[in-house]
Image (cartoon, rainbow, N blue to C red):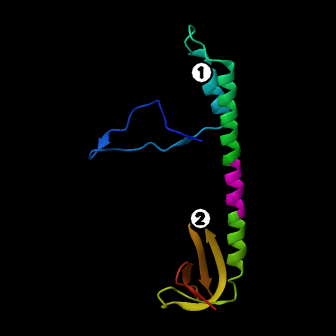
C-alpha cells in the first residue's frame, strides 16, 4: 500500500509543476500506529464505531495479502525468465540490427531484461528482432 507523505516541508514548484515525493510503503506496524493515532485524535463527541476499525483492519489485511501475492508472482516470473534465458546458452544469436552475431556463452538476467554474452565478449540485449538459431 503506497501512501503520500503528509508531514514535512512541501516541495517548491518548479517550472509550474510540483515535484512529487516518492511514495512510501506502509507496513502492518505503521498501519497500527496510524490506527492508534486516529483513535487518540478522534472527536470525543462523535467517536468512530468499532466496526469501522475492524473494516479498516480487514481492508489493510487484504491489501497486504495482495502485495505479498504480487511479490510471489514476481519471483515466479523471474524464475521463468531465468529458465528461458538459460536455454539460450550454446545457441547462435544475431542482434536486431544484424551487426552482432555469435554463439551465446552466458546469459545475465537484469530487472529490465535479458543480456546474452557471446563467446567473443559482445553483449546483445534479448528482445524484439533478435534472431536465435
Q: Residue furthest top?
A: 45
Per the rendering, the mark at residue 81 is: none
At numbered mark 2, what does the secondary structure look like: helix, strand or loop? loop
Residue 75 position within the rendered picture, expressed as x and y whole percent measured from the top left:
70, 60
What span is colored magenta in the figure?
68-76
Residue 13, picture quadrant = top left
Residue 10 sits in quarter:
top left
Q: Residue at x 68, y 83 (%)?
A: 88
Vertical comparison of 85 with 10: above or below: below
Magenta-colored segment: predominant secondary structure: helix
Q: Give the position of the C terminus as an image quadrant.
A: bottom right
Q: Residue 101: within the magenta?
A: no
> Where does the N terminus fall, quadrant-wise?
top right
N-terminal of the two: label 1 or label 2? Answer: 1
Q: Are marks 1 and 2 in contact (CB under 8 Å)?
A: no
Query: Where is residue 11 shown, x and y percent of the image?
Result: 37, 38
The label on residue 37 is 1
In this rendered view, identify the residue nearer to me: 19 or 105.
19
Residue highlighted by disc 2: 111
The image shows residue 38, relative to residue 82, as above or below, that is: above
Q: Residue at horizontal 67%, vertical 59%?
A: 74
Given residues 63 and 9, the one toward you in this image is 63
Residue at 65%, 41% in the rendered image: 63
- Residue 44's place in the image compared with 53, above or below, is above
Amino acid at each position: 500500500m503506497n501512501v503520500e507523505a503528509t508531514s514535512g516541508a512541501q516541495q517548491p514548484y518548479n517550472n509550474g509543476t510540483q515535484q512529487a515525493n516518492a511514495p512510501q510503503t506502509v507496513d502492518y506496524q505503521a498501519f497500527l500506529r496510524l490506527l492508534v493515532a486516529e483513535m487518540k485524535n478522534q472527536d470525543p463527541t462523535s467517536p468512530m464505531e468499532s466496526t469501522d476499525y475492524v473494516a479498516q483492519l480487514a481492508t489493510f489485511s487484504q491489501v497486504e495479502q495482495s502485495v505479498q501475492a504480487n511479490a510471489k508472482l514476481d519471483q515466479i516470473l523471474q524464475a521463468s525468465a531465468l529458465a528461458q534465458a538459460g536455454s539460450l546458452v550454446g545457441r547462435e544469436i544475431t542482434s536486431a540490427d544484424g551487426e552482432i552475431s555469435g554463439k551465446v556463452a552466458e546469459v545475465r538476467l537484469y530487472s529490465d531484461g535479458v543480456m546474452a554474452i557471446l563467446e567473443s565478449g559482445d553483449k546483445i540485449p534479448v528482445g524484439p528482432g533478435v534472431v536465435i538459431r
